[in-house]
Image: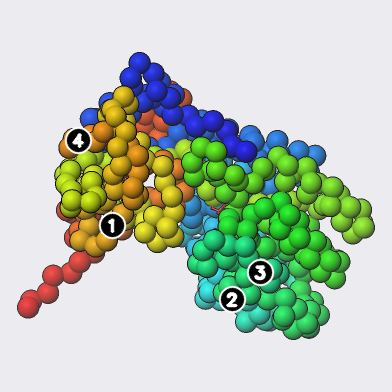
Amino acid sequence: MNCESSLKLENGKYMIRDIDILGLCKKYGTPLYVYDAAKISEQIALFRRAFKGIDLKIKFAAKSLSNINILKLMKKEGIGLDTVSLQEIQFGLQAGFSPEEIVYTPNIEYFSEIIKAAEMGVSINIENLSNLEKFGKEFGNRIPCCIRLNPNIIAEAEREKVSNWHNQSKFGISLFQFDKLEKLVEKYHLRINGIHIHSSHAIMTTEIFLKGAKIIFDLAKKFPDLEYFDFGGGIKVADFEGENVIDIVELGAEFKVVFDEFCAEYGRKLQLWFEPGRFLVGESGYLLTEVVVRKTNGDVEFAGVDSGFNHLIRPMMYGAFHEIVNISKPNGIKQKYSVVGNLCEIDDFGRDRMLNEVSEGDILMIKNAGAYGFVMSSNYNARFRPPEILIINEEAELIRKRETMEDLLRNQIEIEI
Ligand SMILES: Cc1ncc(COP(=O)(O)O)c(C=O)c1O
């Protein structure tokens, strides 16, 4: 279940909260990222509603959209932050989060980074035995830590690359190593205050989630100092209208029953943490791109745009589906097009899409682009990264400028050749 999209067609114009999107493209040029703050707030409210009655702490996964203004919005909404690097922690501090509101969940990290994060006062999440041992030697039980477990549930992933719970996954401490984990905890008197698992979105059904939770609850009884469970992120939003995705309200209700049972058995109420990224910001974001070239190869009609996988890599990297709308011609006759980018590579945004008739100069809107969009962008082909706009309090605010040649050359050092 998801909230309604905030995109509306009114008098032939596509609007987000009374802002005319074509007008924004005219003002700022394309490609352009646009985010809707009110949609983010709605998703946070929905998340809270779903887990009502539980001591819930939402930690926004900064990796999904790390513009400082988005982080400030999260802070204002009263939620915390999930970070995977020291730099993301610094972003969080700059956005006004206190260290206690930030959790650090890196993987394949230098131990020196864990020491720094501990010095910064954020919650520490450790995902491998090597660093857990070093943590024990360095801190003993002076600082608590959370452990990230991999419960080795065979993922029902459509795509191998995102099957994080699968036992091939590099993430977390495998349950096959649980006895070693217990020995380390005993040896260094570690204060394990949290248990973390992160599922990939592909396995997020209520049934599988509860299966994972029960495995973790059984193991949790071995740790007397627990304060919270952290179930990571991975809650999917619909890629297109009518797609069957997890119903978070149903998940929350069913989870509450088993969680309450666990807490009663454990002897005290624990907190429930989540680290959602795409659920909070995915649908709030749109990538707008202009059709530069219309061409055909006889079989396929191409709409070639002024963007590419350097700006939104998910279709090429994961085969992700992003709905595309021709916002310049709301009433154009529907035809089949392949929307392709301008990089000198295979560069598809969408194959065989039914779009309102497309001409050069039209603006295409690529939906659900808020999460893992701009943050995964690059300067490949020496193209500038797009500006970002945040629609907030009925205004469209520029929150990142378009790059320039200066940005592309900034760190290059010219030598005598
Ligand atoms: C540890 C952890 N937490 C949270 C997230 C956020 O996931 P999502 O954006 O799917 O909610 C990720 C994503 O990979 C992750 O690895």
Residue 363: image location, x then y, percent: 26, 35
Which residue sits at x=51%, y=37%?
Answer: 241
Residue 166 shows in this picture = yes
For the residue carrying disc 2, how many other residues have a C-alpha within 10 Å: few (<14), some (14-19), or many (20+)? few
Q: Is mark 3 on a helix, strand or loop?
A: loop
Dot 4: what SS?
loop
Task: Kindly identify which numbered label has been placed on residue 220.
Answer: none
Sequence order check: which comes first, mark 2 or mark 3?
3
Residue underneath mark 4:
359
Q: Callout 3, which amino acid? A: Ile
What residue is shown at x 26% (from left), y 33% (from top)? Answer: 357
In the rendering, which numbered label is found on residue 168? 2
* Residue 85 screen position, x and y as percent: 50, 63
Judged by depth in the image, the label closer to the viewer, 2 or 3, is: 3
Circle 1 Cα neighbour tier, 10 Å, few/some/many (<14 / 14–19 / ≥20): some
Q: Return the mark for residue 347.
A: 1
Q: Mark 2 against mark 4, which lies toward the viewer?
A: 4
Q: Mark 3 points at which residue?
A: 154
